[in-house]
């Protein structure tokens, strides 16, 4: 055991201070220390994307970041994107278009898609597939995931136009 | 998948990082994006009692374009390269290659410095940098020096960088001519079965200059000088391409692994090089 260090994380707008060994993976801090269990552990080897979160406005795999590296970071998880009463357009679209079956990959998928749409608000199907290539799904065959992301994009864009 | 324990440091300048490296010697390593090092630490194939995080060192960041000279700070991520408009016009091969590395989440963390310093034959940037004739800038406890990308790689995970040196930047001239990075992989996000970086200049129907480098076909990246020479003066037609492929085959030394037997890798290397030459030529 090495010494624990003081770590500060801003997760979904709430500041957390905790003690953790530097080697603790960020996904474990989120799930075990903070009880934020939206991000999942699929492979733990940086391949599946189930652990995807936003860190300082970049999509990253939280199984391949040490807690120590994340000290001071701004983090958004699926819990920060919508609430059961007020779903994020992506959450709504995944439900509407059957973008999930078992749901294990879904938090990572939606969190990644949220950042993709920020960077590219009106993507083509090909751009969605390429931009979601770091997220694996064992159930859906991806078709409905892609449909859901495209539908959410047009929903968000329509809402934006209406607001203007 | 929990690595051995380590002490963590986040110095905010290069001198601080160098002092820590010097103090802890063999027991210390720097971490950039961590997307090669952390997997190795999790598998306990790398043990790093003292981990020095470079993320707070501003001097290692930033993309500079000075006339024709391009400098990438070691901590520039693959994502930043892809998003940079100036680079996309000046050195399209850089963006083309970066887009073929891993997946979006990995590219958000992975850095140029980490990719070229790592020494893994599977990394794509080393071959690309050899093709571009890039210079690597390293700083040690006493002095800074420059090492040519073509002289940097000694064996798998063995490079000309000393353990107490930090790679600070990579620089190169924006190349003239047509460029292409072609890569064969088993699936998106995979390392190359074979990849080729090609830059060609042409006057009319004649090739006037050629630089060719191959990835993951030896324990180091391979700058295939003779393969480039085989194209110079030709029209880059079928015979010239075959001559270049034959010269490239002399320079590579693939080994059998889960990406296939040697004969398959050689076959793939030939196809990928032909494709890269054709693309580069059409863009020249
Ligand atoms: C799923 C997955 C797929 C991948 N696919 C590819 C691929 O197709 N092609 C590819 O090229 N790469 C691939 N990678 C590797 C990825 O691009 C890495 O990010 C990159 O190789 C290393 O960069 P890093 O910043 O993460 O370095 P780190 O992992 O932090 O460091 C790697 C090594 O370099 C040393 N180092 C880092 N920075 C410096 C410096 N400034 N000075 C001195 N030494 C330094 C470290 O001490 C360490 O030994 C993949 C990774 C994953 C997880
Ligand atoms: S759990 Fe992190 S990528 Fe699979
Ligand atoms: S819905 Fe089951 S893994 Fe994607």
Image (spheres, coloured by chain):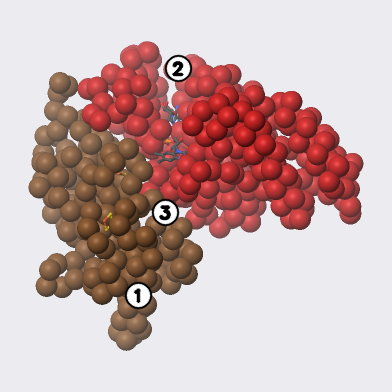
Chain colours: A brown, B red
- Disc 2 and disc 1 in contact, CB within 8 angstroms: no
Residue carrying label 1:
A151
Q: Position of residue A160 (x, y in %)?
A: 33, 80
For the point 83% across and 46% down, the residue is B238
Alpha carbon separation for disc pair 3 and 1: 18 Å
Circle count: 3
Q: Report whether A8 appears left or right of B160.
A: left
For the point 32% across and 73% down, the residue is A152
Q: Nearer the viewer, mark 2 or mark 1?
A: 1
Depth check, front residue: A156 or B12: A156
Q: Are marks 3 and 2 on the same chain?
A: no
Which of the marked residues, 3 or 1, is nearer the chain's N terminus?
3
Alpha carbon separation for disc pair 2 and 1: 51 Å
Q: Chain of mark 2?
A: B
- Mark 3 burial class by Cα count in 10 Å: few <14, some 14-19, many 20+: many
Q: Nearer the viewer, mark 3 or mark 2?
A: 3
**At numbered mark 3, what does the secondary structure look like: helix, strand or loop?**
loop
Residue carrying label 3:
A133
Q: Chain of mark 3?
A: A
Give the quarter of the figure containing the C terminus of chain A. Answer: bottom left
Residue carrying label 2:
B163
For the point 85% across and 48% down, the residue is B237
**At numbered mark 1, what does the secondary structure look like: helix, strand or loop?**
helix
Quadrant for ligand 2 reads top left
For the point 78% across and 32% down, the residue is B246
Q: Position of residue A87 (x, y in %)?
A: 19, 71
């Amino acid at each position: 055991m090495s010494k624990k260090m003081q770590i500060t994380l801003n997760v979904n707008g709430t500041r957390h201070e905790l003690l953790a060994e530097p080697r603790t993976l960020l996904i474990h801090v989120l799930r075990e220390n903070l009880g934020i269990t939206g991000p999942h552990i699929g492979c733990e080897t940086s391949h599946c994307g189930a652990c995807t979160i936003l860190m300082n406005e970049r999509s990253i795999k939280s199984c391949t970041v040490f807690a120590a590296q994340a000290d001071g970071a701004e983090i958004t998880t699926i819990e920060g994107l919508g609430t059961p009463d007020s779903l994020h357009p992506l959450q709504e679209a995944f439900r509407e278009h059957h973008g999930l079956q078992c749901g294990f990959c879904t938090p990572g998928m939606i969190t990644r898609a949220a950042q993709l749409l920020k960077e590219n608000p009106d993507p083509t199907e090909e751009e969605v597939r390429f931009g979601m290539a770091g997220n694996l799904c064992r159930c859906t065959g991806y078709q409905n995931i892609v449909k859901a992301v495209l539908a959410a994009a047009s929903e968000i864009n329509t809402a934006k136009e209406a607001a203007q | 998948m929990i690595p051995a324990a380590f002490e963590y440091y986040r110095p905010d300048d290069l001198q601080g990082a160098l002092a820590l490296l010097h103090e802890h010697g063999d027991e210390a390593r720097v971490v950039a994006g961590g997307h090669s090092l952390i997997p190795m630490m999790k598998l306990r194939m790398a043990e790093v009692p003292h981990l020095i995080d470079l993320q707070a060192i501003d001097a290692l960041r930033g993309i500079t374009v000075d006339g024709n000279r391009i400098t990438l700070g070691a901590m520039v991520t693959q994502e930043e390269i892809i998003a940079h408009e100036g680079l996309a016009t000046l050195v399209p091969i850089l963006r083309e290659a970066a887009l073929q590395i891993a997946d979006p989440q990995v590219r958000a963390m992975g850095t140029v410095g980490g990719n070229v310093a790592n020494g893994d034959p599977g990394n794509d940037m080393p071959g690309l940098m050899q093709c571009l004739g890039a210079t690597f800038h390293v700083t040690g406890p006493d002095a800074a020096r420059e090492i040519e990308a073509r002289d940097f790689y000694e064996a798998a995970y063995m490079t000309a960088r000393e353990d107490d040196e930090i790679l600070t930047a990579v620089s190169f001239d924006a190349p003239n001519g047509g460029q292409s990075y072609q890569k064969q992989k088993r699936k998106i996000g995979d390392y190359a079965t074979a990849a080729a970086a090609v830059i060609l200049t042409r006057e009319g129907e004649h090739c006037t200059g050629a630089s060719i480098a191959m990835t993951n076909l030896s324990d180091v990246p391979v700058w295939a000088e003779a393969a480039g020479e085989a194209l110079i003066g030709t029209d880059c037609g079928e015979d010239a391409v075959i001559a270049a492929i034959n010269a490239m085959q002399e320079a590579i030394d693939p080994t059998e692994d889960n990406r296939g037997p040697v004969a398959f890798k050689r076959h793939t290397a030939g196809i990928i090089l032909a494709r890269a030459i054709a693309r580069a030529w059409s863009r020249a």
